[in-house]
Image (cartoon, helix red, strand yellow):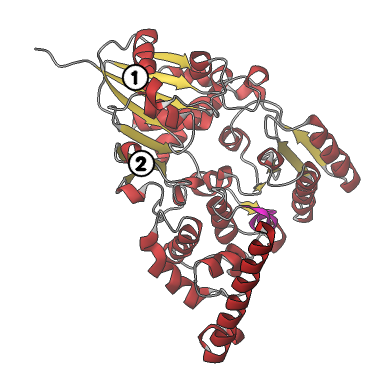
Amino acid sequence: MPAPARTQLFMASTLYGAATLAAALDAGFFPAAGRRLLIVANTAAVPETTPAFDEAPGFERLRTRFDGVLSWNETISPFHPSGWSPRPDDAPLWERHLRLLWGLGTDDVEIVLESLQVNPALALAQLFPDAPLDVYADGLMSYGPTRSRLDPLIGTRVRRLLHLDLVPGLKPLLLTEFGVEPEIVPGEVFTKVLAELSDATATGLPDAPEGAALLLGQYLSALDILTPEEEERLHVRMLRGAVGRGHRTLLFKPHPSAPARWSRLLEEEADRLGAALTVLEAPVLAEVVYQRLRPALVVACFSTALLTAHTFYGLPVARAGTDLLLERLAPYENSNRVPVTIVDALLPGLEDGPDDGPGGRAPDSPERLEALLAAVGYAMQPRIHPGLRPAAERYLAAHLDARTRRYFKRRRLTSLALPGAVPTQLAFLPRHPTVRKVARRALAVRRRLLKRKKATASA
């Protein structure tokens, strides 16, 4: 009896993610299959007004890697991809529906997806409970812990984590609680795929003179991290910093969903400073801009594009605003914390000057950075990674100072009883017998008062 045919389902929500998949396919990470289908998920807040990435310039170059392209939004309409998942009792019905709708028949299905811990990736994994899973990471979040506890019936199906080596020598923490091993998608293959996109979108970019600086917007207010006014001020800070470094020609690449008024405010500030500003409105990846225009400096807050510029293209980079982000991110386990920490610890600040290195804040080796992220990862998800506690204690005991305290919150250290929870000069207090005696008395008085209050209320 012949073996069932094999169909590989690839899900992506961004052009960057689709390019990562194309690079993994070109590098031979996936065995031959009867069919390879790309499932496009448009996770914009209002998908009806924001084109999906398969409509972006250059996507046709990526389409050739797949036998078909499907729309997840159309499949589950009228639900939003980020908010819908199947009810457990309905999952078998949905699987039969999708096998009929997508022509899968009785094929063995393999699924490759991103951000497994949230929808739409989680929903797709739930709909094919027997399918093995491969996860690919298209950004710095792969170096942090899984953002929430995954059902073991999902997590144990993951075979590997494919990721770009954005920080050479640093091993991802994502999904390690299930023993998932990471595999590196070669950077040279990835940049070759991006070169295809660059060739396809060459006409959408203006010419830029030598010495131009590129500013990247991220639309952080949409994530409720900053207010719109604070993000506007951050962009102005980036512009002023670049001009302060001597760049008189500036390029600003706004987030596709950002309001147009932000660009106008930057143009007014550039005029005031006597600099020339060009807003890049073409919907292309930042990496395409790197290849076509070769900026002399790339400035952003904590965008993954900073690391691709630094690692894959050898471009000078600078960060701006990470100090504010480290202060504002809430709750502590916010999954953006690790990308912000990496950028803040590894890359130079915009105000540090072009020759000052990483602002005196970079770890001196990949091992030091890995130790920092182990401590941050444990503080973020202690229940998922209890085995990281000794590493967190060692790092905090040896390296917690005025420079590194920015990566931790005293309240979180206190709740986890980690070093640094109280000032060093007061560290003796929790162990002092008199202090402990007074604390026990205070707790006893508090319990009696609460008991009286309840008794009075019931009367």
95 versus 412 height, above or below? above
Q: Which mark is residue 92?
A: 1
Q: Per the image, is 328 magenta?
A: yes
Which-is-in-front pick, marks 2 and 1? 1
Q: Residues within 10 Å of mark 1 (few under 14, many from 20)?
A: some
Residue 39, quarter of the rendered image:
top left
Report the side of 150 relative to 118 (left or right). left
- Identity, as a three-letter code, of the amino acid under mark 1: Pro
Question: Which sits in the foreground, 352 or 449?
Answer: 449
Boundaries of the magenta span? 319-330
Q: Is 379 placed left or right of 92 in the picture?
A: right
Distance in Å between CA atoms under marks 2 and 1: 27 Å
Can residue 419 be spotted in the picture?
A: yes
Q: Position of residue 60 (x, y in %)?
A: 50, 17
Quick one: SS at disc 1?
helix
| Residue placed furthest toward the left | 1
Q: Which residue is mark 2?
A: 161
Classify residue 425 by image quadrant: bottom right
Which quadrant of the rendered structure holds the N terminus? top left
